[in-house]
Structure formats: structure tokens, C-alpha cells
Image (cartoon, helix red, strand yellow):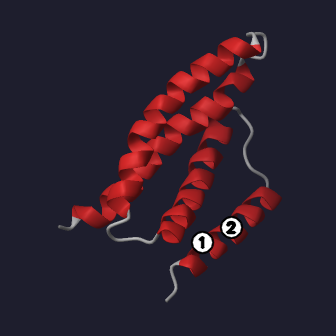
Amino acid sequence: MPYDRILPPLLLVASNVFMTFAWYAHLKFKEVALWKVILVSWGIAFFEYMLMIPANRMGSALYSAPQLKGMQEVITLLVFAGFSAWYLGQPLKWNHWAGFALIAAAAWLIFLD
């Protein structure tokens, strides 16, 4: 089916939105006790896992594990770039984009035969 190829990446995008919030949203709330933000982050990460695990399970029918991981890294960087600029107010600089481009090039190599 045509959605078989696109559904895993879409689930990876959605899971990364949750994980990025779990890992970085607390940076705007430094006055909140660390143990509290850890608990909230775990709660958010639960939803990340509810999307990530099916994405990898379904994706493994079409992609190898290294390909899924490479895809995951690129998606993570794109989601983080948007989150950093929009939510944290810290847009990426040229050197961040250059480093991310190198990671994207590495992920591209993983998909070569």
C-alpha cells in the first residue's frame, strides 16, 4: 500500500515532537524543581514511545534498522531546529546548520545500496 512507505516517517515526526518537548521544554521553566520536570518529561516521553515503537515496527518491513536510525536523526534535527527557534527563541546559526547538514549527508549514505 502507498501509505506503508510514508506512515513510519510521519510517526517518527510526531514522536519527535513529543520527545523534543520532553527533553527541552523545561529549559523555559528553570525555577521548577528538577524532580518535577523529570516526572513531567517522563509523562511526555510516554506518548513519544507510543508513536516511536509502532513507527519502527512498521518501518522495519521496508527499511533496515540503520536506515530507520538515519531517518530518525534527520527528523530529530529538523524538529529540533523548528522547536529551538519557535519555542526557545534560539534560532540556529550557520555552524549549527552546517553540522546538521553533515549529519543529513551521513544519513543519506545509509540509504545507498
Task: Tell me which amino acid carries mark 2.
Answer: Ile
Residue of label 1: 107
Q: Circle 2 sits on which residue?
A: 103
Q: Residue at x 54, y 62 (%)?
A: 69
Is 6 placed above or below 17 here? below
How far apart are the alpha carbons under marks 1 and 2? 6 Å
**CB under 8 Å between callouts 1 and 2?**
yes
Circle 1 packing at 10 Å, graded few (<14), some (14-19), many (20+), is many
Residue at the image point whose x is 63% and y is 69% from the top: 104
Q: Residue furthest left?
A: 1
> Is the residue 41 above or below the residue 12 in the image?
above
Q: Is residue 28 left or right of residue 13?
A: right
x%, y% of residue 38? Answer: 66, 21
For the N terminus, the quadrant is bottom left
101 over 41 or under it: above or below: below
Based on the displayed image, in which of its 4 quarters is residue 4 positioned? Answer: bottom left
Type of amino acid under label 1:
Ala
